[in-house]
Image (cartoon, helix red, strand yellow):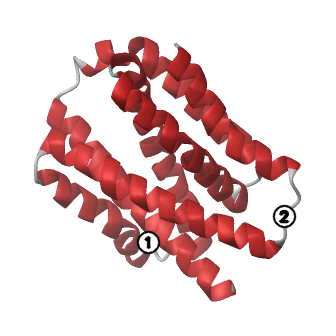
Amino acid sequence: MFLLLLSFVALWSGPCLLMWMPLSPKALRLIDIIVIASILFLIVFHVIPESIEHAGWLAIAAILVGALWPVLYKIASHSDNCQLQRSLLSLASVGVITHTLLDGVALADDAYLGFAVVLHRLPEGLGIWRVAQSAFSKRWGYIALSIMTLSTGVGFFFGSKWLSYAPDNLVGLFEGLMAGVLLHVVFHKSHVQSAHS
């Protein structure tokens, strides 16, 4: 229970500091760079290996589909960039919820993994907050963090039981697909920031 509460504090501490401390645009750009690097680290060294562990090398195909699907969808549907990015963020949020459910399971089942979850919660909270508020609004930032908090708690108390009914490879493929979508969102965000700087 202590690790669960600590993960909540870590998740909300970054956004709370940003709200209470007025920062210059230069400082915010630096924070965004750190957040993007942290999310990339999380995806490459945590989510992708976890998806491969669950689904084998089929997870790589799921990651590629997730990363390339937005481009193919845009070509096929002729949708504008803003509409596409918002739909992508909505899809990526499903992946984030799934990931936080699995984080809750790790907090309940394994102290070592639990501490790893707590440590990555600070950049994760900052990243979700910055992406949600820049794409939508501060209110959506609060909603996103609240949903992450709730899904972590659900994973902590009920996740192990639910996962026992889910096919292992299906969980891994879904994680891989969402990792690909998140990679696309992160690279798009970093490209937009470099174009505006």
Q: Is residue 94 above or below residue 197?
A: above
Q: Nearer the viewer, residue 127 or 181?
A: 127
Crowdedness near tag 1: few (<14), some (14–19) or many (≥20) residues, C-alpha within 10 Å: few
Residue at image coords 61%, 37%: 11
Q: Which mark is residue 77?
A: 1
Q: Secondary structure at mark 1?
A: helix
Instruction: Name which residue lies at 50% across and 26% down.
Output: 152
Q: Percent position (x, y) of residue 98?
A: 41, 36
Relative to 130, 191 lies left or right: left
Give residue 77's position: percent from left, percent from top. Answer: 44, 72
Which label number is shown at residue 60? Answer: none
Q: Report which quarter residue 41 is drawn in.
A: bottom left
Mark 1 and mark 2: Cα distance apart in space: 39 Å
Q: Is residue 22 left or right of residue 122?
A: right
- Say which amino acid is labelled 1: Ser
175 relative position to 58: left or right: right
Camera-side residue: 78 or 107?
107
Above or below residue 197? Residue 175 is above
| Number of the label disc, if any, that sits on residue 23 | 2
Between discs 1 and 2, the one toward the N terminus:
2
Total labels drawn: 2
Report whether 71 appears left or right of 92. left
In depth, the one of 67 and 3 nearer the eye is 3
Label 2 neighbour load within 10 Å: few <14, some 14-19, many 20+: few
Q: Residue furthest left?
A: 57
Q: Are marks 1 and 2 in contact (CB under 8 Å)?
A: no
Q: Quadrant of the C terminus?
A: bottom right
Identify the amino acid type marked 2.
Leu
